Image: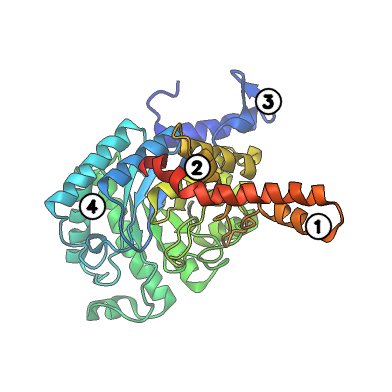
């Protein structure tokens, strides 16, 4: 009966069945094991060296294999989706998008593209809106099937044409009305020209604040029905995201929320890689979000460890075990290359982040045991403690060689 209803229709059907069979099973499948978030995936949204075509294709394969279904392209240093949003991509870049779209379709992953025109767009201009929709049409022709319009770095008081000041005034409410005009125009265009597109989303200027504000209230009143609103939780890189925070944001925006979590992205800490598991998010974040996307690091292969755990959480948040998921993620990335121990050493010593996780946690009890034995009188206990610690350090020393065969090096 569900054939042809699409992903969104299936999601709502599953939610209805959840209510009908609370705590029970249907066709032998425990209700708690059904996916909580219809849309699960990653954002390529970091600032820094963009991924290559090969990197992206490998990520699509990873998404499909780990039951994820969304890849949102929002590269921080891509001028063709920001300052040069009016210009078409060069031929080589268009070929990259086509290849990515083909692989995504084969892997049941929806390819998304985010555009951030707010730094140069006259928001009241019908001509500029047409130009934006032409760019969206061009991306549709390349295989993109979901879009996001971003305004996260837009001023409330600085317009890019005099007509905007006349049309909207100034201040937070004026910015919200202007942004909603553009987003609604894109949403209408998609509905008329590309009815197969997934719901449009907007990244608002206030994407990380808590609760209602003048800007958010105005945006909620102006946005068309069906448009989704992106947020990152309370804070750009929040340690935790609670169900209460999500509920307040959903009430403030009055629209479905796309949770775009800024973990494990590391562009603000380029001397670090964040390989710890996804933690600190209430199950309600998965249940209550229209989509849950994790922002990846510049390092594509390493990103798959935390991204694996984020996908695990999104699939079954109430049954999620971060430690077990993290160990499984390491094994998955290591594959059959024999680099599991080396990868475990790297990940174990790169686990700390804003989210938490104890850095080098596996070493700490070994170090504590060594010092305890050192302070005592049992020479054999000291030798055993030293041997265990020496073995751990030896594993760290060998890790670079052991990693050579993991994820193609």
Whole-percent x and y of residue 17?
58, 29
Mark with earlier residue (3, 4): 3
Instruction: Please tell me whether mark 4 or mark 1 is closer to you in this view.
Output: 1
Can residue 122 be seen here? yes
Write down the residue under mark 3.
24
Q: Which residue is mark 4?
A: 136
The answer to which of 284 and 106 lies nearer the viewer is 106
Q: Give the residue furthest to the front.
A: 379
In three-dimensional space, the C-alpha distance between marks 2 and 3, rounded to whole angstroms, equals 28 Å
List the residue tagged with mark 2.
308
On the image, the x and y values in percent for residue 124 come to 25, 70
Q: Which quadrant would residue 88 be assigned to in this image?
A: bottom left
Q: CA distance from mark 1 to mark 3?
A: 51 Å
Residue at x-position 42% and y-position 41%: 406
Mark 2 and 4 residues: CB-CB less than 8 Å, in contact?
no
Which of the 4 image quadrants contains residue 364? bottom right
Tell me the element at label 4.
helix
Q: In front here: 190 or 346?
A: 346
| Above or below for 366 versus 160 | above
Residue 190 placed where, x, y %? 27, 48
Gap between marks 2 and 1 measured at Cα = 37 Å
Marked residue nearer the N-terminal end (2 or 1)? 2
Callout 2 crowding tier (Cα within 10 Å): few <14, some 14–19, many ≥20: many
Residue 362 falls left or right of residue 143: right
């Amino acid at each position: 009966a569900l054939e042809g209803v699409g992903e969104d229709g299936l999601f709502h059907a599953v939610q209805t069945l959840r209510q009908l069979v609370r705590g029970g099973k249907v066709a032998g499948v425990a209700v708690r094991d059904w996916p909580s978030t219809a849309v699960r995936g990653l954002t390529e949204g970091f600032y820094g060296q963009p991924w290559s075509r090969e990197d992206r294709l490998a990520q699509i394969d990873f998404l499909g294999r780990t039951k994820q279904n969304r890849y949102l392209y929002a590269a921080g240093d891509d001028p063709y989706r920001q300052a040069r949003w009016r210009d078409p991509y060069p031929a080589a870049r268009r070929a990259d998008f086509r290849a990515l779209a083909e692989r995504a379709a084969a892997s049941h992953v929806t390819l998304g593209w985010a555009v951030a025109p707010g730094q140069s767009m006259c928001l009241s201009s019908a001509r500029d809106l047409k130009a934006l929709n032409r760019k969206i049409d061009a991306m549709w022709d390349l295989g993109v099937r979901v879009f996001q319009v971003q305004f996260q770095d837009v001023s409330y008081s600085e317009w890019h044409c005099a007509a905007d000041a006349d049309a909207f005034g100034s201040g937070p409410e004026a910015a919200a009305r202007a942004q909603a005009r553009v987003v609604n125009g894109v949403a209408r265009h998609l509905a008329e020209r590309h009815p197969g597109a997934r719901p449009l989303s907007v990244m608002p200027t206030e994407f990380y604040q808590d609760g209602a504000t003048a800007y958010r209230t105005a945006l909620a009143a102006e946005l068309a029905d069906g448009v989704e609103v992106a947020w990152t939780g309370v804070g750009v890189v929040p340690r935790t995201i609670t169900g209460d925070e999500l509920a307040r944001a959903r009430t403030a925006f009055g629209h479905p929320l796309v949770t775009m979590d800024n973990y494990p992205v590391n562009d603000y800490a380029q001397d670090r890689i964040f390989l710890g598991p996804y933690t600190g998010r209430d199950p309600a974040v998965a249940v209550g979000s229209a989509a849950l996307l994790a922002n990846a690091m510049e390092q594509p292969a390493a990103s798959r460890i935390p991204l694996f755990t984020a996908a695990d959480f999104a699939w079954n948040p109430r049954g999620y075990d971060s430690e077990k998921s993290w160990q499984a993620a390491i094994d998955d990335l290591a594959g059959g290359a024999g680099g599991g121990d080396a990868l475990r050493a790297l990940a174990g010593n790169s686990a700390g982040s804003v989210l938490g996780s104890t850095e080098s946690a596996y070493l700490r009890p070994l170090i504590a045991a060594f010092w305890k034995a050192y302070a005592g009188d049992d020479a054999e206990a000291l030798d055993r403690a030293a041997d265990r610690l020496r073995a751990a350090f030896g594993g760290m020393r060998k890790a670079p060689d052991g990693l050579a065969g993991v994820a193609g090096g």
